[in-house]
Image (spheres, helix red, strand yellow):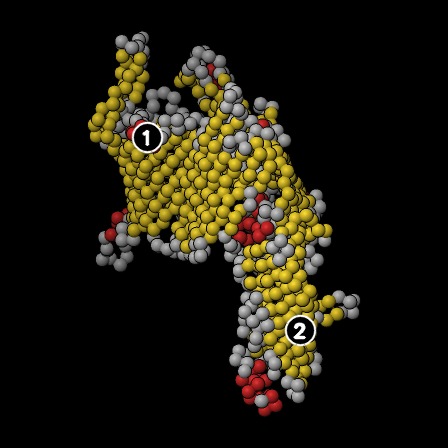
Amino acid sequence: MNGLRVIPVLMLIMVLSNAFGQDTISQLETPVNYNAEDSMVMDLKKEKAYLYENAHIDYGAYSLEACFIEFDFKTKNVLAKYCVDSTGKKRGIPILSDGDTETEADSLMFNFESKRGITYHVKLQEGEGYVHGNKVKRQTNGEIHIDTALYTTCDLDHPHYYFKLRKAIIIPEDKIISGPINLYVADIPTPLGLPFAFLPNQKKGSNGIIIPTYGESSSLGFFLANGGYYHKFKNDQLSTAITGDIYTKGSWALYNTTSYKKRYKHSGNLKLTFRKTKTGEKEFDDYSEKTDFLVEWSHKQDPKSIPGMSFRANIKAGTGSVYENDFGNNVVSPNNYLTNTFNSNIAFGKTFKKVPSNISVNLRHSQNTNTGLISFTLPDITYSINRFYPAKWFNSSNVVKSKARKQLEKIGITYIINSKNETTIADTLLSLNHLDRLNDNMRNGIKHTATASASFPFLGNAITFTPSVNANALMYSYRTRKYFDNETGTVLTDTINDFMAPMWATFSASFTSKVYGFYQFADFMQGAKQSKIRHVLTPNASFSLRPDNGWQYSYIADSLGSLNYATPFDSQIYGSTPTGSSGKVSFNLINSFEMRQNNQNDTTGDNPYVYKKLLDNLTLSSGYDLMRDSLNWDNLSISGRTNIAKLFNTRFGATFDPYARDTNNVIMNQFTKDVEGKLFNITAANLAFGINLRSKKNKTKVESNKGSEEELEEINENLDQYKQFGEAWNWSLNLGYNFQYNRRFQYDAKDTFQLTQTLNVSGQMNITANWNMSFQTNYDITNKKFSYTSVEVTRDLHCWELTFNWVPFGFMKSYNIQINVKSSLLQDLKLQRRRTWYDNGVRD
């Protein structure tokens, strides 16, 4: 009876009801489906079925697979065994699945009616853990009893480590209760043991104590770090962990991490840090005490929750030294160490359908830890009306519209109104008791912007003409007036409370086109692919006209009567209106180069050519102001970028001044060519390039059947942040070079040149299939010294991992060696040796 045979139980009942008796069959209330790859033998006398080779039975929530299965219709007992191939290896090992519990055993007996069973030489999976036992009994209530068991998170048949349990009881989706327990590593018993144990056995995690790490710091004393309590609420929408550090010399810290998520509504995380750092002895001069805090909150609203409305928040605020004195972390975070700004934003947005428009409200915070200045924007409100076409509002009775009407319908108008309220204060002055100080530097205002524009192609779409009108208005509640005080000999500023609404308008028009050309190689250089260089030029010429608004005034700046110029709105939140009249003609020439080759793989003719980028962008720009009485020409700017085969990328730029300067470095209305004999003075230049090299073994996308789709997507989006084990000499290398040049012209003094050059290198390599080394370093070529540098070596030990982190020099000089179990279920099973950066000296 070779070949695949599948007999559903309903058909079997009809055939065997007379032989087995109607009562026997009717007791199987749940349908049984079973099949076998090789054959099935039905013993009508004994009321049994025998299934051979890849046998499978489904009964309700239970699923059984094995090489051989024997099913007794009378007693509802099932017996499953493995087979042995010609090489002596086991195949078709029985696997019994019941929801989240999966049992793998050499042989097993199970009763579908009583739900009781016995398995031999079993491997049972419970969530992230595995239980091995010689004889396992499954009770009617679903509990599993084992006389002697091995508990591990290693998925091998012979695990690298395990806890040996005596008289264990497994309660599915709850816990594992055991008598005496002992840890074995490589089958060698360790001194770590307990008289009894309760092990978590919940797929979604459980509440409990977070075991702290212990150690000694030369600066802070003996410590217990990162210990506390974790609690997940029953609805699985909220979880929180409260942890802390304590040191024998008086330092301590408290942390709270809270996560929340409501499906199709919102999700977010809240992190709170409060730390007290004490170094030295109170009786000595080197004693210091520092208080730090940090608040981090991220919130995201699901777009499906309220269509047309959005709310999101990203808050990060704290003391400037919160990361410098972060003694609770074992490994240095480069992003935290190198950051000097904290930024926050709470944003609300709503879209209106009746009048196509939207409004956004933002509450912003910006903090510079170097300068100690904190800025608050409370609030920043923007209302904008989507582009609309007034000419389309009026219906035309003519079926065929006139040419003029069609052109008018192309004119679109947008309108934006923005309101801001901003204040800046030093962090040393900010406190709950002195919130009134926020009013000292308060600035606010309203800005209106209306734009009307259209695009008209002509000459067969070869040229596009784009005229536009831009009108702006500012609204301020006060103005300023500067004057020279003869008594003090200084310039003073008066603030006058007066509503002001300065306005200005700009009229502009531009012409844009595209020109295509090819540079052909000699015949012997073209090859079979007929290679050519394609050059795309995008010329743009524009004219803008802005009348003078008349707000600029002059004032005496010193006792000699020298004049300076200002406007009443120089210190306002939106600044001043543009001063003077302008009639500028601007020129832009954008170039791109690419290689065009015949597509030899194209057989349909749909894609006859293949294009390869050579230079993505090369832009030259300048301008000429017709209304200036002198210095009409703008600086010439050149910029470009390219990315070749995703291996080499570069950006470059330079600014050239066409005018000469006198002996006092004052700009003259004479060209550099006429005075110095050269076309331009270079005022600024920059160059940055990067090389990204990867071995062919380095994956660009990871595929796995483990974890969720969201986790796999997050890994593929940030693949450079993860290590790829499995293949030796799998490597990647990133090289980056940055060059900055700035020339500063100083009055009656020698020019100064600011030159900055930095080199950064990072990479990773698998020395073997299980050894990985990664590093990053930065070198300041100008100052001839290294900045932040780190090295990390990781050894994949299957179910364990060994990590070595090292910062060889600098303020963050430290190292950390740790060997630990990979599974988060036993994350506290680890051995660690470290020297943290705060032992080098805690900053005040």
The structure residue drawn at horizontal position 41% and vertical position 17%, both measured from the top left corner, is 667
In the depicted view, which residue is nearer to us: 588 or 292? 292
Q: Residue furthest right?
A: 87
Q: Which residue is mark 1?
A: 433
Amino acid type of the residue tagged 2 in the rendering: Ala
Question: In terms of secondary structure, where does tag 1 sit?
Answer: helix
In the depicted view, which residue is nearer to us: 247 or 15? 247
The structure residue drawn at horizontal position 44% and vertical position 57%, both measured from the top left corner, is 234
Question: In terms of secondary structure, where does tag 2 sit?
Answer: strand
Q: Residue 608: image x %, image y %?
A: 57, 54
Q: Is residue 745 left or right of residue 508?
A: right
Amino acid type of the residue tagged 1 in the rendering: Asn
Q: CA distance from mark 2 to mark 1?
A: 76 Å
Q: Residue 202: image x %, image y %?
A: 53, 58
In the depicted view, which residue is nearer to us: 76 or 329? 76
Q: Residue furthest front?
A: 195
Q: Quadrant of residue 373?
A: top left
Observer able to see residue 18? yes
Q: Quadrant of residue 58?
A: bottom right
The structure residue drawn at horizontal position 59% and vertical position 32%, both measured from the top left corner, is 217
Other residues around mark 2 within 10 Å, as few (<14) / some (14–19) / many (≥20) = many
Q: Residue 354: image x %, image y %?
A: 27, 53
Q: Residue 474: image x %, image y %?
A: 27, 33
Q: Which residue is mark 2?
A: 80
Q: Which is more N-terminal, label 1 or label 2?
A: 2
